[in-house]
Image (cartoon, rainbow, N blue to C red):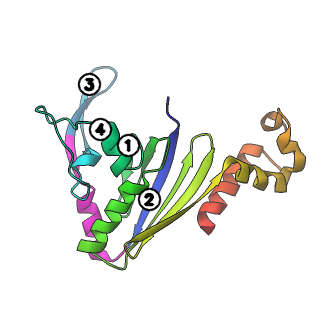
Amino acid sequence: MANHVYFNVTVDGNEECLKGFSSAMETHTVKRKLYDGTEYVCRELLDIDKLKFMPEGTYDKDGYLEDSWNYYVNNVGAKWCNVEETEADYFSGYSAWSAPIQFVLYLHEYLYDHHDKKHSIKMTYEDEFRNFIGVAHYKDANFDWEELDEGDIQEEMKKVFGDAVDKEDFWDGEYDEGDPQEIQDEIVWQWFEEN
């Protein structure tokens, strides 16, 4: 089973850019069923490979993406990716093993070429077990990113808890400094804010 990498993406641009973003993150109406069989209608993002800013895929006679693993790895940056929530200037979701860096780059290039050359995009992401966390910035048709691995995060935790971090039962202990999970969350969120 793949580790989930949770990501949040924020677009900062003019009104035309945000309209372009909204249009690019195209949704469609689908029917779903609840566990009890009750049907309901909702709007969902199109499959990522069908979004207008993504490279065209190759499809079989039934309309399914062929060689989806390679398409996603090469064009999204992860072997699969789910966008769970979209807003006027934001979307979030999760992907497998790595962040969708290439997917967001395609979106950035589309907005740059067609809507607003001065916009910027920021993506924060974290592995579900915090094996790594990262921030990617997209601006001026370029991007860069920075990551911390679990060793870097552990070093930050040592600044608060000292060598207790190395104990096998560290996460189960009670400390004057506070709850280890809450402190780690604060460290990660602070790093996201500062980068």
Q: Nearer the viewer, mark 1 or mark 4?
A: 4
- The residue that label 4 is drawn on is 68
Q: Which mark is residue 106?
A: none
Element assignment for label 2:
strand
The foreground one among 155 and 86 is 155
Element assignment for label 4:
helix
Q: Are marks 2 and 1 in contact (CB under 8 Å)?
A: no
The mark tally for this picture is 4
Q: Is residue 81 above or below residue 103?
A: above
- The residue that label 2 is drawn on is 9
Dot placed on the residue nearer the N-terminal end, 1 or 3: 3
The foreground one among 182 and 35 is 182
Q: Position of residue 185 (x, y in %)?
A: 67, 51
Q: Is residue 79 above or below residue 106?
A: above
Q: Position of residue 113 (x, y in %)?
A: 26, 73
| Amino acid on which the number 2 mark rests in the picture | Val
Element assignment for label 1:
strand
What is the C-alpha distance between the residues marked 1 and 4?
A: 14 Å
Q: Which mark is residue 82?
A: 1
- The residue that label 3 is drawn on is 38
What is the C-alpha distance between the residues marked 2 and 1?
A: 13 Å
Q: Residue at x 78, y 53 (%)?
A: 155
Q: Residues within 10 Å of mark 1 (few under 14, many from 20)?
A: some
- From which residue to which does the magenta span run? 13-29
In the figure, is residue 68 to the left or right of 167? Answer: left
What is the C-alpha distance between the residues marked 3 and 2?
A: 33 Å
What is the C-alpha distance between the residues marked 1 and 3?
A: 24 Å
Q: Residue at x 32, y 60 (%)?
A: 106
Q: Is residue 56 above or below residue 146?
A: above
In the figure, is residue 62 to the left or right of 14? Answer: left
Q: Are marks 3 and 2 in contact (CB under 8 Å)?
A: no
Farthest residue in the bottom direction? Answer: 118
